[in-house]
Image (tube, grey):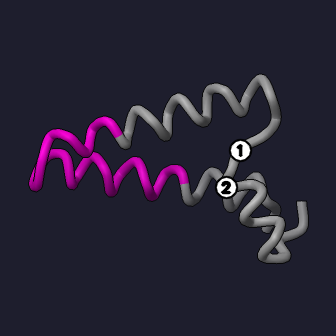
Amino acid sequence: MTVDRYLRMIAGLMIVASLALGHYVSQNWYYFTAFIGLNLFQSAFTDWCPMMSILRKLGIKG
């Protein structure tokens, strides 16, 4: 898999997890959901995301 595919997989997992935590634990988890969405939005324009840097350092080919 490529960096982009891993990024989408991790982002989707984190969004679903934060929505579940927001529903069952504390509504403050919804801020984390918003952070992920804003980060994905800015990465569409800058082509840079912190998770992409982490994945590349782990040796994932992009």
Is residue 29 shown left or right of residue 53? Answer: left
Quarter occupied by residue 48: top right
Task: Give amino acid for label 2.
Answer: Met
Position of residue 61 measured from the top left corner of the image (x, y, whole percent): 89, 68
User: Is residue 37 depicted above or below 24 in this figure?
Assistant: above
Which residue is painted at 49% across and 40% down in the image?
A: 36
Is residue 45 found inside the magenta-colored segment of the image?
no
Magenta run includes residue 17: yes
Q: Position of residue 3 (x, y in %)?
A: 79, 59
Q: Main secondary structure of the magenta part?
A: helix
Residue that badge 1 annotates: 49
Which residue sits furthest top? 45
Establish if 5 lies above or below 15: below
Give the amino acid type for the residue marked by disc 1 in the picture: Cys
Picture quadrant where residue 51 is located = bottom right
Q: Secondary structure at mark 2?
A: helix
Q: Which mark is residue 51?
A: 2
**Badge 1: residue crowd in 10 Å (few <14, some 14–19, many ≥20):** some
Range of the magenta residues? Answer: 11-31
Quadrant that contains the C terminus: bottom right
